[in-house]
Image (cartoon, rainbow, N blue to C red):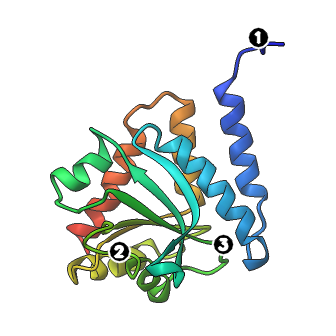
Amino acid sequence: MEYTGSIDLNEIIDALIINLRSIPIGTKFASEYHKFIKSVLEILFHPHLSNPTMEEKIHQGRKRVDIVMNNITSGGFFYRLHDINKIFCPYVFIECKNYSKDVANPELDQLSGRFSFNKGKFGLLMCRNIDDRELLYQRCSDTYRDDRGLIIPLDDIDIISMLESLKNNEDDAIDNLMESIKKKIIING
């Protein structure tokens, strides 16, 4: 039997926002948060990023990355990272922190430690809340200025904003948000 109903994108987005808000904060629920982030990033960054894999092993299994996605784009933010900013990024490394407190240098160092000349030097640090955005952007800028790669932190507010932009057919909103954060880190940091 074939499915003949239509898919309501707005209902899916509303459900994703409710789901995100319902995931408890804390290490006990880290796996649930990682799975959600994998799914939502696949939606938000389609068709630019693909093939998300969880718990990707690197360094012959001695280290793991929460999520790795292939950068397959020919335009937009992820293309400009390589083409204009000269940030090698065939893969996007994603670390997920289901913390109640702000992420700090150890989390940034963990993610930048996954970067390499051969694999790429760009990542997303997903977290639940950023109380002091200016400080976190300055820390990301330190990492960038030290030539250890570019890290863009995103929290629940950013995810919800991007989902709402999909719902409102604001085609450039996700790229604009990512560019805005990138600019703050690269230029203003």
Q: Quadrant of residue 115?
A: bottom left
Q: Which residue is mark 1?
A: 4
Q: Which mark is residue 115?
A: 2
Give the amino acid type for the residue marked by disc 2 in the picture: Phe
Residue 118 x, y percent position in the rendering: 27, 69
Marks 1 and 2, how far apart in space?
Answer: 45 Å
Q: Nearer the viewer, residue 106 or 91?
A: 91
Dot 1 falls on a residue whose secondary structure is: loop
Depth check: 117 or 154 in front? 117
- The span from disc 2 to disc 3 (Cα, nearest Å) is 22 Å
Give x and y (percent) for residue 56. 54, 67
Mark 2 or mark 3: whose residue is earlier in sequence: 3
Q: Earlier in the sequence, mark 3 or mark 1?
A: 1
Between the C-alphas of marks 3 and 1, the distance is 38 Å
182 up-or-down from 79: above or below: below
Extreme residue in the bottom direction: 106
Q: Earlier in the sequence, mark 1 or mark 2?
A: 1
Residue at image position (54%, 46%) is 42
Which amino acid type is shown beneath numbered disc 1? Thr
Task: Reply above or below: 127 against 37.
Answer: below
Q: Which residue is mark 3?
A: 98
